[in-house]
Each structure stands twice: as C-alpha cells, then as structure tokens.
Image: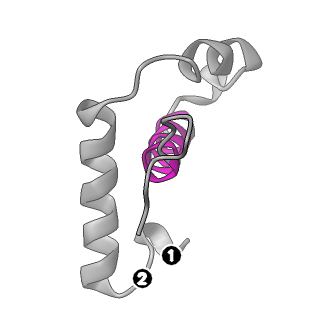
Amino acid sequence: MSRPGADGSDAFGRAMQAMALHRELDRLPGFMKTPAIRQVLVPAAHDASCLGPLFGEMAAAMVAGGAPGGR
C-alpha cells in the first residue's frame, strides 16, 4: 500500500503527476518541445485537470488489454 513518507511526500501522487507531465509534454507541437518550456511546465501545479485525462487513458488501456497507441 502506498503511504506518505516521513516527510509527507506521496510517491504515488508524484508518479501520477510525472506521468501527466510526460503526457502533456509529449502532446506539445514540435516547436514547443524546448528546455525552456520544460522548465516552465515541470514546477507548475498539476491537478485533476492534468490527471483526469491520464486516468482516462489508463482505464482505456486496461479495458483494451494494452497501452494506448501500442506503446
């Protein structure tokens, strides 16, 4: 079971945020995939508006029996 660490960190939550961030960065047009944009997006708050679509993709992959897009 995932539990917060002694410092209050939440490994599962951080993993979900990292996956959502990767999804968002992957969907950017090519000209926006720069280190400067990454520096802006990484520290930004990632909440339900970012995680909702990620959970939808994960659920679709589970129902379909594989990763979306064959990844």
Magenta region includes residue 50: no
**Range shown magenta:** 11-25
Q: Position of residue 4 (x, y in %)?
A: 45, 47
> Rounded to the nearest whole Å, what is the CA distance between mark 1 and mark 2?
7 Å
Residue visible at 75% across and 19% down?
Answer: 35
Residue 68, position as x, y percentages in the image: 41, 69
Count of numbered circles in the view: 2
Q: Give the answer, above or below, for where 41 lies relative to 64.
A: above
Q: Nearer the viewer, residue 5 or 32?
A: 5
* Mark 1 element type: helix
Instruction: Kindly identify the amino acid type of the residue bearing the numbered disc 1.
Output: Gly
37 relative position to 64: left or right: right
Based on the picture, tell me whether residue 20 belongs to the magenta stretch: yes
Asked whether the residues under the numbered discs 1 and 2 touch, taking CB atoms below 8 Å apart as contact, a structural biologist would say yes
Between 32 and 18, the one nearer to me in the picture: 18
Crowd class of label 2 (few under 14; some 14 to 19; many from 20; radius 10 Å):
few
**Label 2: which residue?**
66
Q: Quadrant of residue 58?
A: bottom left
Which residue is under mark 1? 70
Looking at this view, is 30 or 13 the one in front? 13
Q: Amino acid at mark 2?
A: Gly
**Residue 55 vertical placement versus 23 (above, below):** below
**In the drawing, does residue 25 fall left or right of residue 55?**
right
Identify which residue is drawn at 41% across, 69% down. Answer: 1
Kindly give the residue lying farthest to the front in the view shown.
6
Residue 61's spot in the image, x, y percent?
34, 74
Give the overall secondary structure of the magenta segment: helix
